[in-house]
Image (cartoon, rainbow, N blue to C red):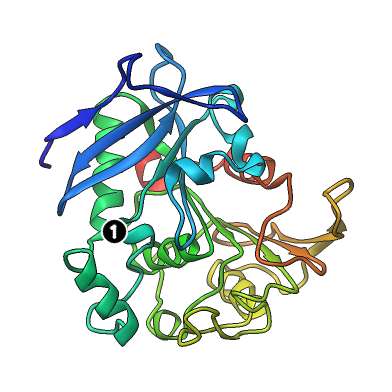
């Protein structure tokens, strides 16, 4: 791997996420071009479980790190938290040759379509090489447009992550038609039933109102069937989850991997305040099988 890496850790360049009180380092990595990210970690602890969280469209790593719902996923919980930046404030989740015209035009404006799967692979390899992350316990989660790339990674069978989180995310039709994960996919989903951007019932994403997506229930069923889970889920209501009622369907009796689906009743294009804890609770006991042998 090209290890032309620049990690900015000096006190003069470090910054503080005021809302969380956690020191965060900006980092840079050369892949297809210079890529950037924000990392929160404790020093001198050795390789740690790591959550990589992808922002939504028009976002950034630093901004999503400030979201209160995600502030508990860092060092205070024993995890490393990494928040990458998408080029052009978005992610290239498109299959080769399948990008719609609006994204082809957008990619020209940022110097060509970025290799975001390559970026994530290089980022994981670098975190492991530097002794920051435990290779058996690296997890990927994405919000909205970031969940599209998370799904693209699942479908591409990269084999480098031990679990996945899909937050206000749905499956694009073009990707879903060719998605064939090669192994079990431990996944947790959080969707608002009144999401007006990535529609819960499926249809067209707004904006750009040109990406057609599956219903959220279909995506949950896709993972349940892929993981060999029984059709009947364990049902519960999450107490004190915020202003909206949150219902949980949990499939644990699976031949492959578990699936959890949180429905935020009446929730829009956002996540409940306890979402960071939901990710921690789901990921904490997940280990990548290929690396544990």
- Residue under pointer 1: 117
Q: Nearer the viewer, residue 201 or 49?
A: 201
Q: Residue at x 57, y 76 (%)?
A: 222
Q: Is residue 235 left or right of residue 168?
A: right
Q: Is residue 276 left or right of residue 244?
A: left
The C terminus sits in image quarter = top left
The answer to which quarter of the image holds residue 88 is bottom left
**Percent position of residue 215, x then y:** 63, 82
Q: Is residue 288 left or right of residue 121?
A: right
**Percent position of residue 55, x then y:** 47, 53
Name above or below for residue 164 compared with residue 197. above
The N terminus sits in image quarter = top left
Name above or below for residue 55 compared with residue 52. below
Residue 70 in sight:
yes
Residue 184 in sight:
no
Q: Residues within 10 Å of mark 1 (few under 14, many from 20)?
A: some
**Percent position of residue 279, x then y:** 62, 45
Q: Nearer the viewer, residue 173 or 192?
A: 192
Q: Nearer the viewer, residue 39 or 107?
A: 107
**Percent position of residue 254, x then y:** 63, 62
The answer to which quarter of the image holds residue 101 is bottom left
Q: Residue at x 58, y 62 (%)?
A: 255
Name above or below for residue 286 compared with residue 207. above
Helix, strand or loop for disc 1: helix
Name above or below for residue 98 compared with residue 292. below
Q: Residue at x 61, y 43 (%)?
A: 67
Please tell me how many numbered marks the rendered image carries.
Answer: 1
């Amino acid at each position: 791997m090209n290890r032309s890496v620049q990690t900015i850790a000096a006190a003069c360049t470090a910054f503080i996420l005021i809302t969380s009180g956690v020191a965060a380092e900006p980092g840079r990595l050369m892949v297809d071009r210079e890529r950037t990210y924000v990392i929160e970690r404790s020093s001198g602890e050795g390789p740690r479980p790591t959550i990589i969280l992808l922002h939504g469209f028009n976002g950034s790593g630093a901004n999503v790190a400030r979201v209160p719902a995600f502030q508990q996923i860092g060092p205070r919980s024993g995890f490393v938290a990494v928040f990458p930046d998408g080029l052009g404030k978005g992610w290239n989740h498109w299959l080769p040759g399948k990008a719609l015209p609006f994204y082809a035009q957008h990619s020209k404006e940022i110097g060509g379509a970025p290799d975001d799967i390559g970026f994530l692979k290089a980022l994981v390899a670098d975190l492991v090489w530097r002794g920051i992350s435990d290779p058996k316990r690296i997890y990927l989660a994405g919000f909205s447009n970031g969940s599209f790339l998370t799904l693209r990674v699942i479908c591409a069978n990269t084999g480098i992550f031990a679990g996945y989180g899909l937050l206000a995310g749905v499956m694009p039709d073009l990707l879903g038609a060719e998605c064939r994960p090669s192994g079990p996919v431990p996944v947790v989903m959080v969707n608002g039933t009144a999401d007006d951007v990535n529609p819960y019932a499926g249809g067209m994403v707004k904006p750009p109102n040109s990406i057609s997506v599956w219903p959220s229930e279909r995506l949950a069923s896709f993972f349940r069937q892929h993981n060999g889970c029984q059709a009947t889920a364990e049902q519960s209501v999450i107490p004190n989850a915020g202003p909206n009622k949150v219902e949980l369907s949990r499939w644990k009796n699976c031949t492959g991997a578990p699936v959890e689906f949180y429905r935020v009743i009446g929730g829009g294009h956002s996540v409940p305040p306890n979402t960071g804890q939901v990710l921690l609770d789901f990921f904490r006991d997940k280990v990548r099988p290929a690396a544990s042998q």
